Amino acid sequence: AIAQHAAALFDSGLLAGQRVVITAGPTREALDPVRYISNHSSGRMGFALARAAVDAGARTTLVSGPVQLATPAHVRRVDVESAQQMLDQCLELLPECDIFIACAAVADYRPATFASQKIKKGAERSSLELVRNPDIVATVAASSAAPFTVGFAAETSKLLEYAQAKMENKQLDMIVANDVAGAGIGFNSDENAATVLWPGGSEVLEQASKLNIARRIIALIAKQMKNSSE
Amino acid sequence: AIAQHAAALFDSGLLAGQRVVITAGPTREALDPVRYISNHSSGRMGFALARAAVDAGARTTLVSGPVQLATPAHVRRVDVESAQQMLDQCLELLPECDIFIACAAVADYRPATFASQKIKKGAERSSLELVRNPDIVATVAASSAAPFTVGFAAETSKLLEYAQAKMENKQLDMIVANDVAGAGIGFNSDENAATVLWPGGSEVLEQASKLNIARRIIALIAKQMKNSSE
């Protein structure tokens, strides 16, 4: 409790007056009324970031896919299912957003068609046509008057290489690279470890609780925003 | 509490000495280390059946896909992810099973290949090759020394027609038909309504709590087993 209180005091005011929007959790892409494609994201990292942002004095909104988590105190939460719904909500929030953190594990693809009736079992083999989902973080970063935009790269190989390329291609201000293949960290775990990259720098965050990692990411965002405004 | 106690007394001993295996929840079919295909089954109906079976005196095992539910008292629980794992567990339990209730919402198809690394985003359109999953309830019903086998039919249209055909094709002893398109019942709901069919008869179970529906299904199973052994 003392450590938590100390952390709160340390962070207090770092993002005072800033409006933060954070996406969290998986998305679900419906095939029909009962079936969907999704992923193992628990939403814990995004929710930890929301708590850390509130502790740092920010007005914080979570745009969350389906998760089994309580909303942190003082956080506004908007629930969505699909990537398209998540994008729509983020664009609606964009005019009042200074910092955008895209922590959700958004499905890259969705079924090309939605069957309004449950699809009946048929042939031994089948194939599911997929179309690319909108790229939420790239859309936000490319908008006129874009907020300070932070992406996440969850990879199982060539982590830093992919993360660096993703940051450059999508013109992000920062990217958090974490290796979801690591045991004891990442999806559905209470702990995480990551490397944070920004244009011209990086910092390794050793394995710690997701809240601890979240506080350090929030502190790095505050520092980078201060540097780039000077 | 009095009503619950009365129900317990009423059911008590109906399945005394019987060994019941119940599948519950969705299955998850992995595309790669992070993505999967699944469905909206909450597992509540299967877990309610397990509780009702225990109350009726049965030795009860739940083979459950990923759900957010506590295991009912005195129920043995085996957790699985995929349809193939669920089938393997059921076949392992089959030599000691008198009644098999297939309540799980098993994925009809799984991805034809599993990518051990996270699949990278590529073309604007893509397609996912799928192969049929094993049919768990049909496999059990077709086994030599098959238990009394109960299937579920969750449909959004032509409910009784599909359910009757499913019972006949798979040689089931009973099938529970429920309309998952109905508001307030079915997947992720606390209530359910169903029509129970068996060769030569049927009974409509009006909307009620899943535990109430479960108790009535258990009573119908006991009655049918008694009739067919006479």
Image (cartoon, coloured by chain):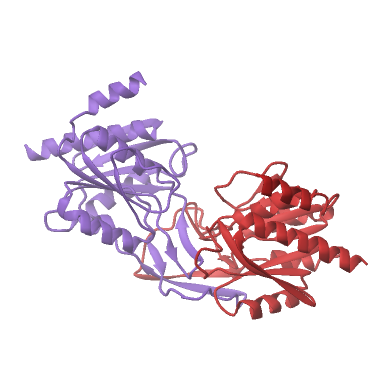
Chain colours: A red, B purple
The extreme right residue here reads A230
**Residue at 59 percent of width and 80 percent of height:** A158
The part of the image, by quadrant, that contains residue B89 is bottom left
Left or right of A145 on screen, residue A31: left
Percent x, y of residue B75: 29, 42
Q: Which residue occupies the extreme front position in the image?
A: A2
Q: How far across and down, in percent of the image, does residue B48 sit?
A: 35, 38
Please give left or right for residue A102 compared with residue A115 in the image.
right
Instruction: Give the answer, above or below, for where A70 lies relative to A158.
Output: above
Residue A146 in sight in this render? no
**Residue B89 shows in the view:** yes
Q: Is residue A126 above or below residue B13?
A: below
Q: Quadrant of the C terminus of chain B?
A: top left
B96 vs A29: above or below: above
Q: Residue furthest left?
A: B230
- Residue at far top of view: B2
Residue at 86% from the left image edge and 49% from the top image edge: A17
Q: Residue at x 33, y 24 (%)?
A: B4
Q: Nearer the viewer, residue A42 or A122?
A: A42
Question: Where does the image place residue A183, in percent across and percent down from the top left?
Answer: 49, 67
Q: Quadrant of residue A113?
A: bottom right
How many numbered marks are there?
0
Q: Quadrant of the N terminus of chain B?
A: top left
Image position of A225 (left or right of A75): right
Q: Position of residue B93 (x, y in %)?
A: 21, 54
